[in-house]
Image: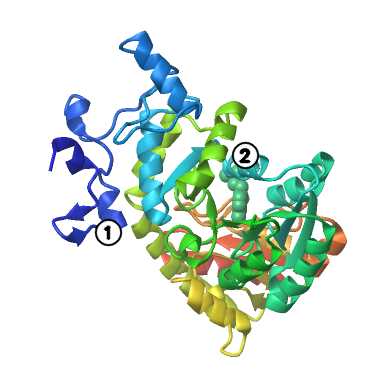
Amino acid sequence: MTEKGKWRSRMLGRRPLSPETLMMGYGYDPFLSERSLKPPVFRTSTFVFRSAQDGKEFFELAYGLRQKRPNEEPGLIYSRINNPDLEMLEDRLAIWDAAEASLVFASGMAAISTTLWAIVRPGDVLFHSDPVYGGTDFLLKRILPQFGVTPIGFAAEGGTAAQAEAAARARSAGPVAAIYVETPANPTNGLVDLAETRRIADTLGQGGRRPVIIADNTMLGPLFQTPLSLGADLVITSLTKYVGGHSDLIAGSCSGSRQILESIRGMRTILGTMCGPETGWLLMRSLETLKLRMTAAADNARRVAEFLRRHQQVKSVWYLGFLPDGDPDRQVFERQCTGAGSTFGFEVKGGETEAFAVLDRLEVIKLAVSLGGTESLASHPAAMTHSDVAPEEKQRLGISPALIRLSVGIENADDLIADLDQALSALG
Ligand SMILES: Cc1ncc(COP(=O)(O)O)c(C=O)c1O
């Protein structure tokens, strides 16, 4: 194997290497960077061309003016187009997402909006699951309609029947360009059946064009769910959450086939929604511990959820590991997910006053939105992340005033349970 191939090999002889092993160096050759074990932060806006001809050829490729020649590597031009830290990070994210390629963005919302700008056009219908993260909800229901795109939603909680019924409405409303699903949904943990979504997509195709299936995998991804292997065409992740994992950065990604990503990459270059090299570097640091963190947090979450389920001031716990045997979501969960993750909601007995009383008494668990960090966070979706969602929709989707969302971190589980116990005691 050539030296170059060695840093890009996913195999040890005939043994395929696991993602967690590859995160320690895949795609980076220390001998190109003064033998530094870790990649440097390539903090530069632009790159020097060896010759004018090189610059011409790099631009031709970057702007899609010609096909890539065999074994040709895209040349570095300008950090809005490409940057070594982002390229290494994208190669590593693609491994987790089981994708051909990946693109990174300045935020999860930048990933979602840039992807949708590249795919939907005025007159198109966007078929989507409900609920979705509050920012996505605003984009789909308030911003895209201003550009002539019609959103038609289906309740994740309604199962395949609700999805099929809404699909019929979507078909009659116009050409369906994309199906956008968030599964599990934030904040309800409602599940969408991806295989069924793929079947529906096939029925919605028109003129040989099937809607592109986009799955937001933020809540379980990339460790506990791989939507591309379940029928999705694109997988979006807010890297701000589990992948970044330390609540110290904002970023997003979109993974899929090279062909679909090409137009999204072009849109990213023009909108300028890529992330910076410093963030890219931090994300590579985080990927090294992704599996450890997500596994430890998931173990803690199970213990915390079990404690809450037994507490007399708690009305319900929406933890994926508790789906009852006969529930159709249980089958979807078992088919699609390899773990229950560590973000879930629970309802206290009472309403907003009682939920706020618990939130205000927490000491170890911080009162903040976001999820997926090493530290545990608690928030109130109805008044915070989903405050933009219309009141009747909140009610329909189960985002009640009594709902608290917990993102369980990697602290000592008994400390977290003690904190929740003392906070819940405020309710008498
Ligand atoms: C499921 C989901 N998707 C997307 C986003 C948006 O990500 P970001 O805040 O990185 O823009 C969030 C943020 O909370 C989220 O929870």
Label 2 element class: helix
What x and y, as percent, mark residue 410?
A: 42, 59
Question: Height in image: 124 above or below 43?
Answer: below
Q: Is residue 49 visible?
A: yes
Q: Quadrant of residue 83?
A: top left
The residue indicated by pointer 1 is 18
Tell which of 119 and 292 is nearer to you. 119
Q: Is residue 249 visible?
A: no
Q: Quadrant of residue 308?
A: bottom right
* Farthest top residue in view: 52
Tell which of 404 and 237 is nearer to you. 237
Q: How many numbered marks does the figure carry?
A: 2
Pointer 1 or 2: first along the chain:
1
What x and y, as percent, mark residue 244?
A: 45, 46
* Relative to 189, 81 lies left or right: left
Question: Height in image: 219 above or below 104?
Answer: below
The type of residue carrying mark 1 is: Ser
* Relative to 395, 373 lies left or right: left
What x and y, as percent, mark residue 245?
A: 45, 49
Colouring method of the image: rainbow
Give the residue at x 65% y 64%: 201
- Front position among marks 1 and 2: 2
The residue indicated by pointer 2 is 114
Image quarter in which the N terminus is found: top left
